[in-house]
Amino acid sequence: MRELLLVPDRLPFAVMLKHSPHRIEHARDLLTVLVLKEFRVRYKRTVLGYAWSVLQPLAFAVVYYLVFRRFIRVDTGEVGYTLFLVLGLFPWQWFNNAVAGGANALVVNATLIKQVSFPRVYAVISGLLNELLHFVLTLPIMLLFLFGSGGRPRLAWLWQLPLLLLVQALLTLGLALLAAAGNLVLRDLERLIGIGLLMLFYLTPVVYPPDLIPQDLKWILYANPMGCLVVLWRDVMINASVDLWILGLAVAWAVSAVAAGVVVFRRLEPRFAELI
Amino acid sequence: MTTLPPLISGPTGTGPRAVPAGDPLIEFSGVGKRFRRTAGCYGLKDWLAQRVRRRGRETRATGWTDALRNVSFCLHRGEALALLGRNGSGKSTVLSLAAGVLRPTTGRVTIRGRVSPLLGLGAGVHPDLTGRENVYLNGVLLGLTRREVRARFGAIEAFAELGELMEQPVRYYSSGMLARLGFSVATHLDPELLIVDEILAVGDAAFQAKCYARIAEQRARGLTMLYVSHEVSTVLKLCDRVLYLQGGRVAAQGAPQAVCGRYYADQGLTLGPATSEPAMQGEAPCAS
């Protein structure tokens, strides 16, 4: 028999309702302090601080430009290669950091998890919020490149951009929950995820256009949620158009990731403190 | 000295408190806890090894250790219970279960009301945050909102007497200063249950005295406490009841003087009856 009774959860509904403003305020504050902590810890004693999150992808962009544009001469048609690259690289960077960080989210907070009984999902969500924040802060740089190459702001962005943000946020949430919980059971997962992300990067059309993928191998693009999302991000930014079929695929991926993540996380949650 | 709301039914409302005061705050009935013998998490290598010789002998990863067996006790509201026992006797496991951090393998742990104590003082402290930020982090992890922490911040700051250091990263604190911060936070955030896990020894004499006074003050207002210390003198001074653990089982529980005496006797020491100081005369005499 395994049981832990937490009486507050069994309170009459009226009592719960009376306290719900407090609960909501508390949930918000819990996220705030954890996000702040994360931010502070990440940039502890660095001179450039937040600028690193922009400098890193930009530095890689220079190398990719040299290798794929100048050496291999990848052709991206009317869209300049630099713009093409940046529009794919920043969303990828967000995905990559969120999933890799998710695998570590619980391990990094080991002392908290072993000593305080707060809902563990906050440790994962606060990390994800941090990555989301970083991505939103890099959006102006994407726009800078876009307007620099003659693009213009579109009215349709008002619904397209939040939609893509939401879909990718859900996708990273699901995968981060899976990675965080799984990494406690099997510590090798962290390494596997590192390798997996690097492989996925090359399978995702970040440094090359998707039409370079031969027709019989096109399924690889659709089987890859980030492949779908990178295509969507570029289409939205450049043409303000959304391929509904690809959007549907991305949504399906995101929803299944969240479902799997929530199931696995909740299943393992009671054992986190002893697994960590 | 402070104008904080009363501990148990504060108007600031730190969560639902609709539990009748008569029920114990924490109840263990027949609790057992088992841990995997290897570090808890195990790698791909062990996992594969286990797959390969599935029906074979016990592998490293499949060994189990019983940290607790059939432990039953109650902690009533307003009571101070001391956990006594030698290293590895299961005290920390009891604390983790009472804090709701671990789940029992067998038996039942009932936690009534809003009990989310910090396990040990300074438990949720992060070295890269300043003292101030840690106060907020701890407070919010304990279940208060930032507004509620803000209302108590002045009192915490005054009690800790850290001065300028409050704005410095905790990384630069000495262990004594860390204890000051941890204790001030833990006793000012209106916990329903305070867990004190041998930390007071670090502070200087004046601060220790202040801490004991604070505990006494809070206890008078109804604070419930779980206290772990090897200093029997403080156990006798602070606690109503003692639970003595031996190898994961309850060896004795009851009045402090009697149980502490037994604890000392088991180690071949004697407990001074009149003074509350343990009488230790040179080498421990060998029991024959």
Image (spheres, rainbow, N blue to C red):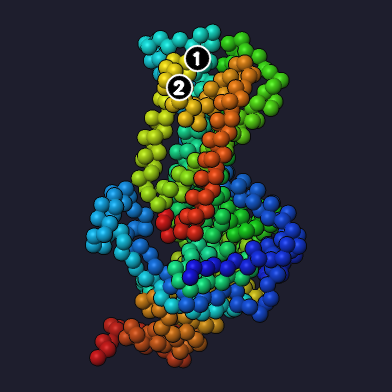
Is A184 above or below relative to A14?
A: above
| B273 lies left or right of B116 | left
Residue under label 2, please give it: A218
Sequence order check, earlier mark of 1 and 2: 1
Q: Position of residue A105 (x, y in %)?
A: 48, 46
Residue annotated with mark 1:
A82
Question: Three-letter amino acid code at disc 2?
Answer: Lys
Residue closer to the observer: B178 or A30? A30
Q: Where residue B222 sits in the image (x, y, percent)? A: 65, 75
Can you tell which of label 1 and label 2 is closer to the viewer? 2
Separation of marks 1 and 2 at Cα, in angstroms:
24 Å
Residue A19 coordinates in the image, percent (x, y): 72, 59
Query: What is the number of the mark on residue B111?
Result: none
The image shows residue B182 at horizontal and vertical percentages of 53, 61
Q: Is residue A230 visible?
A: yes
Look at the image and tell me in which quarter the C terminus of chain A lies. bottom left
Left or right of residue A7: residue B40: left
B250 in relation to A35, above or below:
below
Three-letter residue code for mark 1: Thr
Query: What residue occupies the far top of the structure in this picture?
Result: A78
Same chain shared by disc 1 and disc 2: yes
Secondary-structure class at tag 1: helix
At 68% across and 62% down in the image, what residue appears? B14
Q: Secondary structure at mark 2?
A: loop
Of the pair A115 and A220, the residue shown nearer to us? A220
Please give the name of the residue rendered at 43% of the width and 12% of the height, measured from the top-left corner: A74
Residue A108 in view in this figure: no
Read off the chain for label 2.
A
Residue at x-position 52% and y-position 53%? A266
- Please name the residue shown 47% across and 61% down the image: B176
